[in-house]
Protein backbone atom coordinates (compact mmCIF):
# COMPACT_ATOMS: atom_id res chain seq x y z
CA UNK A 1 0.00 0.00 0.00
CA UNK A 2 1.15 3.56 -0.66
CA UNK A 3 -1.27 5.46 1.58
CA UNK A 4 0.25 7.06 4.65
CA UNK A 5 -2.55 5.96 6.97
CA UNK A 6 -2.24 2.53 8.52
CA UNK A 7 -4.84 0.00 7.35
CA UNK A 8 -7.67 -1.00 9.65
CA UNK A 9 -9.38 -4.31 10.36
CA UNK A 10 -12.35 -3.10 8.34
CA UNK A 11 -10.23 -3.81 5.26
CA UNK A 12 -10.72 -7.46 4.38
CA UNK A 13 -7.09 -8.28 3.62
CA UNK A 14 -5.98 -6.82 6.99
CA UNK A 15 -8.77 -8.26 9.14
CA UNK A 16 -6.61 -10.86 10.91
CA UNK A 17 -3.28 -9.05 10.82
CA UNK A 18 -1.08 -7.68 13.60
CA UNK A 19 -1.45 -3.96 12.99
CA UNK A 20 0.68 -3.05 15.98
CA UNK A 21 3.62 -4.97 14.54
CA UNK A 22 2.89 -3.52 11.11
CA UNK A 23 3.27 0.02 12.47
CA UNK A 24 7.00 -0.58 12.98
CA UNK A 25 7.41 -0.95 9.20
CA UNK A 26 4.98 1.69 7.98
CA UNK A 27 4.95 3.06 5.35
CA UNK A 28 5.79 -0.01 3.33
CA UNK A 29 8.21 0.16 0.39
CA UNK A 30 7.05 -0.38 -3.17
CA UNK A 31 6.31 -4.01 -4.04
CA UNK A 32 8.81 -6.24 -5.80
CA UNK A 33 7.89 -6.56 -9.47
CA UNK A 34 8.42 -9.75 -11.42
CA UNK A 35 7.80 -9.75 -15.17
CA UNK A 36 8.00 -13.06 -17.01
CA UNK A 37 8.35 -12.43 -20.74
CA UNK A 38 6.52 -14.29 -23.49
CA UNK A 39 7.47 -17.95 -23.62
CA UNK A 40 9.82 -17.82 -20.63
CA UNK A 41 9.83 -19.97 -17.48
CA UNK A 42 10.71 -18.43 -14.11
CA UNK A 43 11.16 -19.92 -10.64
CA UNK A 44 11.17 -17.68 -7.58
CA UNK A 45 11.27 -18.39 -3.88
CA UNK A 46 11.13 -16.78 -0.44
CA UNK A 47 12.14 -18.25 2.92
CA UNK A 48 10.58 -15.74 5.29
CA UNK A 49 12.41 -16.34 8.57
CA UNK A 50 12.59 -12.91 10.20
CA UNK A 51 13.93 -12.72 13.75
CA UNK A 52 11.67 -13.27 16.74
CA UNK A 53 9.69 -10.18 17.66
CA UNK A 54 10.29 -8.42 14.35
CA UNK A 55 7.91 -7.76 11.47
CA UNK A 56 8.39 -8.64 7.81
CA UNK A 57 6.13 -7.75 4.88
CA UNK A 58 6.92 -8.86 1.32
CA UNK A 59 4.67 -7.65 -1.50
CA UNK A 60 4.96 -9.00 -5.04
CA UNK A 61 3.36 -7.80 -8.26
CA UNK A 62 3.80 -10.50 -10.91
CA UNK A 63 2.96 -10.31 -14.62
CA UNK A 64 3.18 -13.52 -16.64
CA UNK A 65 3.02 -12.88 -20.38
CA UNK A 66 1.52 -15.12 -23.06
CA UNK A 67 2.85 -18.71 -23.08
CA UNK A 68 5.02 -18.02 -20.02
CA UNK A 69 5.20 -19.77 -16.65
CA UNK A 70 6.02 -18.62 -13.13
CA UNK A 71 6.33 -20.84 -10.05
CA UNK A 72 6.83 -19.39 -6.59
CA UNK A 73 7.83 -21.42 -3.50
CA UNK A 74 7.26 -19.84 -0.11
CA UNK A 75 8.05 -20.88 3.45
CA UNK A 76 6.60 -18.38 5.93
CA UNK A 77 7.92 -19.08 9.45
CA UNK A 78 9.58 -15.99 10.97
CA UNK A 79 8.81 -12.84 12.91
CA UNK A 80 6.00 -11.63 15.12
CA UNK A 81 4.30 -10.65 11.86
CA UNK A 82 5.20 -12.35 8.62
CA UNK A 83 3.07 -11.28 5.68
CA UNK A 84 3.54 -12.11 1.99
CA UNK A 85 1.22 -10.84 -0.75
CA UNK A 86 0.91 -11.62 -4.44
CA UNK A 87 -0.92 -9.66 -7.13
CA UNK A 88 -0.65 -11.77 -10.30
CA UNK A 89 -1.87 -11.11 -13.84
CA UNK A 90 -1.80 -13.89 -16.43
CA UNK A 91 -1.65 -13.61 -20.21
CA UNK A 92 -2.95 -16.15 -22.72
CA UNK A 93 -1.84 -19.74 -22.05
CA UNK A 94 0.25 -18.55 -19.09
CA UNK A 95 0.64 -20.39 -15.80
CA UNK A 96 1.21 -19.31 -12.19
CA UNK A 97 1.89 -21.75 -9.36
CA UNK A 98 2.13 -20.89 -5.68
CA UNK A 99 3.54 -23.59 -3.40
CA UNK A 100 3.49 -22.33 0.17
CA UNK A 101 3.71 -23.38 3.80
CA UNK A 102 3.00 -21.45 6.99
CA UNK A 103 4.46 -22.81 10.23
CA UNK A 104 4.00 -20.72 13.36
CA UNK A 105 3.89 -20.80 17.14
CA UNK A 106 3.94 -18.47 20.12
CA UNK A 107 2.12 -15.23 19.32
CA UNK A 108 3.09 -15.15 15.65
CA UNK A 109 0.80 -13.82 12.94
CA UNK A 110 1.70 -15.29 9.54
CA UNK A 111 -0.20 -14.45 6.38
CA UNK A 112 -0.38 -15.22 2.68
CA UNK A 113 -2.60 -12.90 0.63
CA UNK A 114 -3.13 -13.54 -3.08
CA UNK A 115 -5.03 -12.07 -6.01
CA UNK A 116 -4.61 -13.98 -9.28
CA UNK A 117 -6.23 -12.42 -12.34
CA UNK A 118 -6.81 -14.50 -15.46
CA UNK A 119 -6.95 -11.70 -18.01
CA UNK A 120 -6.66 -13.78 -21.21
CA UNK A 121 -7.91 -17.20 -22.38
CA UNK A 122 -6.39 -20.65 -21.76
CA UNK A 123 -4.31 -19.71 -18.72
CA UNK A 124 -3.87 -21.95 -15.69
CA UNK A 125 -3.04 -21.36 -12.03
CA UNK A 126 -2.66 -23.43 -8.89
CA UNK A 127 -2.26 -22.38 -5.28
CA UNK A 128 -1.33 -24.98 -2.66
CA UNK A 129 -0.86 -23.82 0.92
CA UNK A 130 -0.31 -25.91 4.05
CA UNK A 131 -0.35 -24.38 7.55
CA UNK A 132 0.77 -25.79 10.91
CA UNK A 133 -0.03 -23.62 13.92
CA UNK A 134 0.64 -24.06 17.62
CA UNK A 135 0.28 -22.11 20.88
CA UNK A 136 -1.46 -18.76 20.17
CA UNK A 137 -0.29 -18.36 16.57
CA UNK A 138 -2.56 -17.06 13.82
CA UNK A 139 -2.12 -18.25 10.26
CA UNK A 140 -4.16 -16.75 7.44
CA UNK A 141 -4.64 -17.39 3.75
CA UNK A 142 -6.87 -14.90 1.92
CA UNK A 143 -6.85 -15.54 -1.79
CA UNK A 144 -8.92 -14.68 -4.83
CA UNK A 145 -9.03 -16.01 -8.36
CA UNK A 146 -10.44 -13.42 -10.74
CA UNK A 147 -11.47 -14.53 -14.24
CA UNK A 148 -12.08 -11.79 -16.79
CA UNK A 149 -14.92 -11.98 -19.31
CA UNK A 150 -12.60 -12.86 -22.19
CA UNK A 151 -10.54 -15.41 -20.21
CA UNK A 152 -12.33 -18.47 -21.57
CA UNK A 153 -11.00 -21.97 -20.81
CA UNK A 154 -9.36 -20.83 -17.58
CA UNK A 155 -8.26 -23.72 -15.34
CA UNK A 156 -7.49 -22.69 -11.76
CA UNK A 157 -7.54 -24.13 -8.24
CA UNK A 158 -6.80 -23.29 -4.61
CA UNK A 159 -6.02 -26.03 -2.07
CA UNK A 160 -5.73 -24.77 1.51
CA UNK A 161 -5.23 -27.06 4.53
CA UNK A 162 -4.37 -26.10 8.09
CA UNK A 163 -3.36 -28.19 11.10
CA UNK A 164 -3.90 -26.85 14.64
CA UNK A 165 -1.65 -28.24 17.36
CA UNK A 166 -3.42 -26.32 20.14
CA UNK A 167 -6.98 -25.11 20.55
CA UNK A 168 -5.60 -21.62 21.22
CA UNK A 169 -4.13 -21.38 17.70
CA UNK A 170 -6.18 -19.84 14.88
CA UNK A 171 -6.34 -20.66 11.18
CA UNK A 172 -8.14 -18.36 8.77
CA UNK A 173 -8.79 -19.58 5.24
CA UNK A 174 -10.77 -17.60 2.71
CA UNK A 175 -10.41 -18.76 -0.90
CA UNK A 176 -12.60 -16.82 -3.33
CA UNK A 177 -13.64 -17.06 -6.98
CA UNK A 178 -14.87 -14.16 -9.10
CA UNK A 179 -15.74 -15.44 -12.56
CA UNK A 180 -17.09 -13.50 -15.53
CA UNK A 181 -16.30 -16.04 -18.29
CA UNK A 182 -18.62 -18.98 -18.91
CA UNK A 183 -16.19 -21.68 -20.09
CA UNK A 184 -13.92 -22.24 -17.09
CA UNK A 185 -12.74 -24.90 -14.68
CA UNK A 186 -12.18 -23.41 -11.23
CA UNK A 187 -12.11 -25.08 -7.83
CA UNK A 188 -11.20 -24.20 -4.28
CA UNK A 189 -11.15 -26.00 -0.98
CA UNK A 190 -10.16 -25.22 2.60
CA UNK A 191 -9.95 -27.51 5.62
CA UNK A 192 -8.80 -27.05 9.22
CA UNK A 193 -8.05 -30.05 11.42
CA UNK A 194 -5.95 -31.62 14.16
CA UNK A 195 -3.44 -34.44 14.27
CA UNK A 196 -4.94 -37.89 13.80
CA UNK A 197 -5.20 -39.35 17.31
CA UNK A 198 -5.53 -42.89 15.96
CA UNK A 199 -2.30 -42.50 14.01
CA UNK A 200 -0.54 -41.12 17.09
CA UNK A 201 -1.80 -44.05 19.17
CA UNK A 202 -0.62 -46.53 16.56
CA UNK A 203 2.85 -44.98 16.43
CA UNK A 204 3.05 -44.92 20.24
CA UNK A 205 2.10 -48.61 20.34
CA UNK A 206 5.12 -49.30 18.15
CA UNK A 207 7.42 -47.61 20.67
CA UNK A 208 7.70 -44.17 19.09
CA UNK A 209 7.89 -41.23 21.48
CA UNK A 210 5.11 -38.61 21.14
CA UNK A 211 7.33 -35.78 19.88
CA UNK A 212 8.82 -37.91 17.11
CA UNK A 213 5.39 -39.23 16.12
CA UNK A 214 3.93 -35.73 15.90
CA UNK A 215 6.88 -34.44 13.89
CA UNK A 216 6.60 -37.29 11.38
CA UNK A 217 2.89 -36.68 10.89
CA UNK A 218 3.44 -32.97 10.44
CA UNK A 219 6.28 -33.55 7.98
CA UNK A 220 3.96 -35.73 5.91
CA UNK A 221 1.30 -33.01 6.10
CA UNK A 222 3.54 -30.40 4.45
CA UNK A 223 5.35 -32.91 2.23
CA UNK A 224 5.10 -32.18 -1.44
CA UNK A 225 4.95 -28.40 -1.18
CA UNK A 226 8.63 -28.11 -2.08
CA UNK A 227 9.09 -31.35 -4.05
CA UNK A 228 9.16 -29.69 -7.44
CA UNK A 229 11.76 -27.02 -6.63
CA UNK A 230 14.28 -27.31 -9.47
CA UNK A 231 17.29 -26.46 -7.28
CA UNK A 232 18.04 -29.46 -5.06
CA UNK A 233 20.21 -27.53 -2.60
CA UNK A 234 17.52 -24.90 -2.23
CA UNK A 235 14.88 -27.55 -1.70
CA UNK A 236 16.94 -29.14 1.05
CA UNK A 237 17.36 -25.74 2.71
CA UNK A 238 13.59 -25.15 2.70
CA UNK A 239 12.86 -28.65 4.00
CA UNK A 240 15.45 -28.34 6.80
CA UNK A 241 14.01 -24.98 7.89
CA UNK A 242 10.49 -26.41 7.87
CA UNK A 243 11.51 -29.45 9.92
CA UNK A 244 13.38 -27.33 12.46
CA UNK A 245 10.34 -25.10 12.89
CA UNK A 246 8.00 -28.09 13.25
CA UNK A 247 10.25 -29.64 15.87
CA UNK A 248 10.15 -26.42 17.87
CA UNK A 249 6.35 -26.64 18.03
CA UNK A 250 6.13 -30.18 19.39
Image (tube, rainbow, N blue to C red):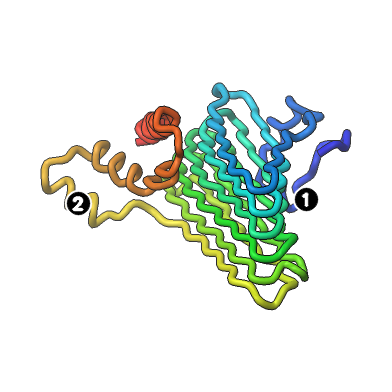
Q: Residue at x 71, y 62 (%)?
A: 146
Which image quarter holds the N terminus? Answer: top right
Res 31 → quadrant: top right
Q: Residue at x 64, y 55 (%)?
A: 94
In the picture, measured across the screen, residue 36 lies left or right of residue 50, that is right
In the picture, measured across the screen, residue 111 lies left or right of residue 148, that is left
Classify 10 Å Cα crowding around label 1: few (below 14), some (14-19), many (20 and above): few
Q: Residue furthest right?
A: 4
Label pair 2/1, CB-CB below 8 angstroms = no
* Label 2 sits on residue: 201
The answer to whether one can see residue 248 in this image is: no
Q: Secondary structure at mark 1?
A: loop
How many labels, in total?
2
Res 79 → quadrant: top right
Q: Report the front residue among 21 and 184.
A: 184
Q: Report the front residue among 181 and 212.
A: 181
Q: Residue at x 82, y 37 (%)?
A: 6
Q: Is residue 246 above or below residue 97?
A: above
Q: What label sits on residue 87 in the rendered view? A: none
* Label 1 sits on residue: 11
Q: Secondary structure at mark 2?
A: helix
Classify 10 Å Cα crowding around label 2: few (below 14), some (14-19), many (20 and above): some
Residue 183 point in image, percent of width and height: 66, 76
Residue 83 point in image, percent of width and height: 64, 37
In the picture, measured across the screen, residue 158 lies left or right of residue 181, that is left
The answer to whether one can see residue 162 in this image is: yes
- Mark with earlier residue (2, 1): 1
Q: Residue furthest front?
A: 39
From mark 2 to mark 1, how far is it between C-alphas?
43 Å
Which image quarter holds the C terminus? Answer: top left
Amino acid sequence: MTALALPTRRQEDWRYSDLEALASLWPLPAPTRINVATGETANHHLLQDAADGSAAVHDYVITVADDARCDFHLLNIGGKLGRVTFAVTLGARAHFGLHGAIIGGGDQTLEIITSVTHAQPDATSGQTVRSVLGSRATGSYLGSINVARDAQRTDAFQSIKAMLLDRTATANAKPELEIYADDVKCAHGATVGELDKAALFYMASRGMDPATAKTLLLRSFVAGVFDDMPDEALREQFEAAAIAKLESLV
